[in-house]
Image (cartoon, grey):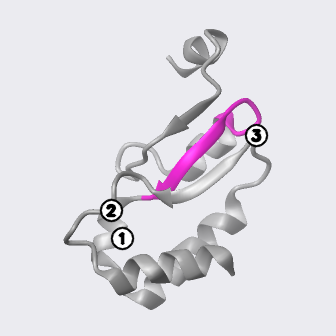
Amino acid sequence: MMDELIAAGIDARHSNEDNIAPFEYWTQEYGEKIGNFGGMDMNVLCSFDEKQIEEYVADLLSRLGKTHGLAFGSGNQITDYTPREIFLAMVRAFRG
């Protein structure tokens, strides 16, 4: 269905859940055609510790390859039960 959406002029997508399709899939499959927003599965964000978050982000960014555009963040809204220090670890890891 994505090809039809792209043909209709959709040039970006948001939200991500690794159990459905990892963010890397979207960037590799469609990254040269559309921008991708998100990247961090909320399940990961709420269950990993700071070191695991840093490793997850570094690994993800190393595998993204060419993209039409990327806005990295959570795959959905930041919930009130998301640990603040984990969210900040994600931001720090992305900034390098």
Does 33 sit above or below residue 1?
below
Image: magenta residue range:
30-40
Task: Name the residue: 77% across, 36% down.
Answer: 32
Circle 2 sits on which residue? 78
Circle 1 sits on which residue? 45
Q: Cβ–Cβ below 8 Å for labels 1 and 3?
A: no
Task: Name the residue: 21% across, 68% down.
Answer: 80
Q: Which mark is residue 16?
A: none
Q: Earlier in the sequence, mark 1 or mark 3?
A: 1
Q: Quadrant of the C terminus?
A: bottom right
Q: Percent from the top left, x then y, of residue 49? A: 36, 86
Q: Cβ–Cβ below 8 Å for labels 2 and 3?
A: no
Q: Give the residue type that dot 1 points to.
A: Leu
Alpha carbon separation for disc pair 2 and 1: 9 Å
- The residue closer to the viewer here, 16 or 10, is 10
Q: Percent from the top left, x then y, of residue 56? A: 52, 74
Circle 3 sits on which residue? 68
Q: Cβ–Cβ below 8 Å for labels 2 and 1?
A: yes
